[in-house]
Image (cartoon, helix red, strand yellow):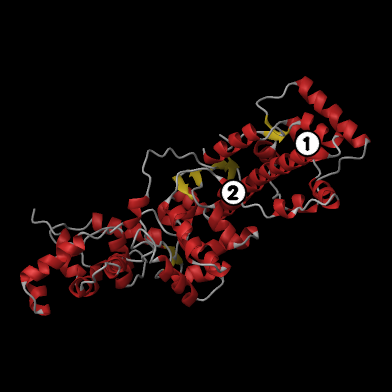
């Protein structure tokens, strides 16, 4: 809906841009005559290099559905509007093309409720003046979940940003000073510690409990903790109550909850040769340049009218081309994912392969940051359900057989093992190592402990039931 709102706003404000609902034969004939007239005057050319190179080898049906406003819009738009010639003409007339070429990506122009990411980006722009820090910070913020936690490791961020981990950590420390306090943490301990250390009056006992006794606090071993720290129970309880005032999920404070109806951007289609993807164009208007204003611009030679039309013409071209490039990139990413996840599409979650942004970026010959941006809040409808495109990017673990296993697959295996355990004698993390080895998954105990906590599954002693 955000893109549709942006388009509708531009249509209302820009007379040069128009939306076509349907095209009848009379309209088509009229547009063809206009095109022939322009060609006779030498005012049209084919699409030039930079536009043509941006287009992947989409099936003809996909191209027509994706960016063809209708048949007249396709011919009139692509042949009447010569991108290179138009920009070059403006340069020759003394108008700078820089204001066009440096426009932001279309995603950044949406009018929407400020999200947690928006709130953090605003603070980032206020906190640093260097482009390098802003770039690294935007990569970090783009991987912070709605609850406020950083979803990927420093090494993966360093690979995407092409810097060392020390640089990532330095900028992450800056983000740790942002509101809501605790955002960007990589664990509950780090989240609570950031908040505790930001209090106007720091409490050493609070920080000690967070740093060394979180699990024991969860077990309510208060007498044992008080004895070890040589403090009274009252002092311990007072510090615990202070910890309870902290937020374990700071990002929730800046989330705008509502009923979200997901419309997938891509649909996986079963074919005779496997799988393909189709773009979902619901809500994407069919756009073209209004022929009247196009002709008026050609006939107007000077004054404010010409300048006004040139600005609106440029704005309309930018929007049309940006929507096209956006959809083409989404298609490329979706096609790459489908190509690499055939077993998952066929057999389900247990066959999900580990992937990182670099895998898709290399396949479609784009930068990792572009893939990261285009997969945010974009969804794909598959035989296994609807998933955000970012869902497919996660770490892998070497299995007992030497194959890479998806971390999501390992988590599912942990859930399956625990679901089938004897509740009167639940499995410890060490015993789960053995259980997973019998499933050809050689996973370290610390990894199982980490994933169990991420799944919010308590340890064995808290899963035990007497009956």
Give the CA distance from mark 1 to mark 2.
38 Å
User: Which residue is disc 1 drawn over?
Assistant: 305
Tell whether 106 sits left or right of 411: right
Instruction: Answer with the quarter of the image where residue 22 lies.
Output: top right
Q: How crowded is mark 1: few (under 14 residues within 10 Å), some or many (20 or more)?
A: few
Disc on the earlier residue, 1 or 2: 1
Identify the disc placed on residue 330. 2
Q: Is residue 142 visible?
A: no
Check disc 1 and report its element: helix, strand or loop.
Answer: helix
Residue name at image x 70 percent, y 49 percent: 57
Instruction: Answer with the quarter of the image where residue 149 lies.
Output: bottom left
Q: Which sits in the foreground, 67 or 298?
A: 298
Task: Indicate whether 397 appears above or below 301.
Answer: below
Task: Indicate whether 441 appears above or below 271.
Answer: below
Task: Indicate whether 106 appears above or below 162.
Answer: above
Q: Residues within 10 Å of mark 2 (few under 14, many from 20)?
A: many
Q: Which sits in the foreground, 195 or 349?
A: 195
Tell whether 383 sits left or right of 298: left
Q: Residue 243: percent from the left, percent from the top?
A: 20, 64
Residue name at image x 45 percent, y 50 percent: 347
**Image label count:** 2
Tell whether 218 sits left or right of 454: left
Q: Residue 431: percent from the left, percent from the top?
A: 23, 69
Identify the disc placed on residue 140. none
Q: Residue 173: percent from the left, percent from the top?
A: 41, 71
Task: Indicate whether 372 appears above or below 86.
Answer: below
């Amino acid at each position: 809906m955000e893109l549709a709102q942006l388009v509708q706003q531009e249509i209302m404000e820009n007379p040069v841009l128009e939306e076509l609902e349907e095209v009848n034969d009379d309209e088509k004939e009229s547009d063809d005559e206009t095109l022939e007239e322009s060609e006779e005057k030498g005012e049209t050319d084919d699409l030039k290099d930079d536009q043509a190179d941006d287009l992947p080898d989409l099936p003809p049906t996909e191209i027509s559905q994706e960016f063809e406003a209708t048949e007249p819009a396709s011919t009139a738009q692509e042949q009447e509007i010569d991108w290179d010639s138009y920009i070059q003409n403006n340069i020759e007339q003394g108008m700078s093309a820089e204001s066009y070429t440096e426009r932001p990506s279309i995603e950044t122009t949406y009018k929407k409720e400020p999200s947690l990411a928006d709130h953090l980006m605003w603070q980032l722009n206020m906190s640093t003046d260097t482009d390098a820090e802003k770039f690294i910070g935007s990569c970090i913020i783009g991987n912070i979940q709605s609850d406020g936690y950083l979803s990927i490791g420093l090494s993966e961020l360093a690979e995407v940003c092409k810097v060392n981990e020390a640089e990532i950590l330095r900028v992450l420390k800056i983000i740790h000073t942002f509101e809501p306090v605790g955002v960007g943490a990589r664990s509950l301990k780090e989240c609570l510690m950031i908040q505790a250390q930001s209090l106007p009056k720091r409490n050493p006992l609070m920080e000690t409990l967070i740093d060394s006794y979180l699990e024991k606090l969860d077990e309510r071993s208060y007498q044992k903790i008080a004895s070890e720290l040589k403090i009274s129970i009252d002092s311990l309880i007072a510090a615990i109550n202070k910890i309870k005032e902290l937020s374990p999920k700071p990002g929730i404070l800046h989330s705008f909850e509502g009923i979200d109806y997901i419309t997938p951007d891509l649909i996986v289609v079963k074919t005779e040769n496997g799988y393909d993807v189709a773009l979902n164009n619901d809500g994407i208007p069919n756009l073209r340049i209004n022929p009247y204003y196009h002709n008026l611009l050609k006939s107007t030679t000077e004054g404010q009218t010409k300048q006004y039309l040139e600005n609106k013409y440029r704005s309309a071209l930018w929007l049309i081309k940006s929507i096209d490039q956006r959809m083409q990139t989404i298609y490329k990413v979706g096609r790459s994912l489908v190509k690499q996840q055939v077993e998952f599409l066929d057999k389900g979650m247990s066959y999900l392969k580990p992937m990182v942004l670099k895998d898709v970026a290399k396949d479609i010959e784009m930068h990792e940051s572009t893939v990261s941006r285009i997969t945010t809040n974009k969804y794909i409808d598959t035989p296994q359900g609807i998933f955000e495109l970012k869902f497919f990017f996660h770490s892998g673990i070497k299995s007992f057989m030497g194959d890479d296993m998806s971390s999501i697959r390992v988590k599912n295996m942990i859930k399956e093992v625990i679901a089938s355990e004897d509740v009167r004698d639940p499995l410890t993390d060490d015993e789960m190592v053995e259980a997973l080895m019998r499933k050809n998954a050689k996973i370290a105990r610390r990894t199982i402990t980490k994933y169990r906590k991420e799944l919010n599954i308590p340890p064995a002693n808290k899963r035990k039931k007497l009956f």
